[in-house]
């Protein structure tokens, strides 16, 4: 599971660089990520992580793009807005979740979420949107099926 702050392009790319370092630590045989993990090229980091996410047998991941509150919308191209689509994995074998405060964003299946009172409600939403059954609270109050 990867949690990428998407408040702006630079922060999103830094999140990808952190993900690249984590992936390389856990999978040191991935030579194409070694230079990315050790370097500072944020564009390379984004592409390297997207490549890893798209690997044929790599289907057990969730990436959350959090705080995407300044989307580039049709007819509005204000300062700081950006299109997140080039940063999304080009595969449908994992799970992608985008959080936003924008009611105008048209991307995927929107789910309106109000303040949640209990963690089990959060897990129900995650289970439904990721199409993964059986998410529940386990020891330490963490989901057991991620």
Image: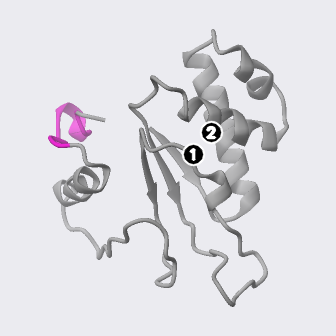
Secondary structure mostly seen in the magenta stretch: loop
- Name the residue located 46 percent from the left edge and 26 percent from the top edge: 58
Which part of the image, by quadrant, shows the N terminus? top left
Judge left or right: residue 95 versus residue 19: left
| Along the line of sight, the residue nearer the viewer: 14 or 129 | 129
Residue 136 found in image quarter: top left
Measured in 3D between alpha carbons, the distance from the residue under mark 1 to the one under mark 2, in whole angstroms, is 7 Å
| Along the line of sight, the residue nearer the viewer: 42 or 76 | 76
Any mark on residue 105, and which? none
Task: Indicate the position of residue 57 as horizontal and vertical percent values.
Answer: 45, 22
Residue extending furthest bottom? Answer: 75
**How many labels, in total?**
2
Judge left or right: residue 37 versus residue 60: right
Q: Are marks 1 and 2 in contact (CB under 8 Å)?
A: yes
Helix, strand or loop for disc 2: helix
Mark 1 vs mark 2: which is more N-terminal? 2
Task: Indicate the position of residue 137 as horizontal and vertical percent values.
Answer: 17, 41
Helix, strand or loop for disc 1: loop
Q: Residues within 10 Å of mark 1 (few under 14, many from 20)?
A: few
Which residue range is magenta in the image?
A: 133-144
Q: Is residue 31 above or below residue 75?
A: above
Which residue in the protein does label 1 denote? Answer: 90
Task: Indicate the position of residue 143 as horizontal and vertical percent values.
Answer: 25, 39
Judge left or right: residue 52 versus residue 123: right
- Name the residue located 51 percent from the left edge and 84 percent from the top edge: 104
Residue extending furthest top? Answer: 29
Task: Indicate the position of residue 72 as horizontal and vertical percent values.
Answer: 67, 76
Of badges 1 and 2, nearer the viewer stands 1
Which residue in the protein does label 2 denote? Answer: 50
Q: Is residue 48 above or below residue 98?
A: above
Residue 78 found in image quarter: bottom right
């Amino acid at each position: 599971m990867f949690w990428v702050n998407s408040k702006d392009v630079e922060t999103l790319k830094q999140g990808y660089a952190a993900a690249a370092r984590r992936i390389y630590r856990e999978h040191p045989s991935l030579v194409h990520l070694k230079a990315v993990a050790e370097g500072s090229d944020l564009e390379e980091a984004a592409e390297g992580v997207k490549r890893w996410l798209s690997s044929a047998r790599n289907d057990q991941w969730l990436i959350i793009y959090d705080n995407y509150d300044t989307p580039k919308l049709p007819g509005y191209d204000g300062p700081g807005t950006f299109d997140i689509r080039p940063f999304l994995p080009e595969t449908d074998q994992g799970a992608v979740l985008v959080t936003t405060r924008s009611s105008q964003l048209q991307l995927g299946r929107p789910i309106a979420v109000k303040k949640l009172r209990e963690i089990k409600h959060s897990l129900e939403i995650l289970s439904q949107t990721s199409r993964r059954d059986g998410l529940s609270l386990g020891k330490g109050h963490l989901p057991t099926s991620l």
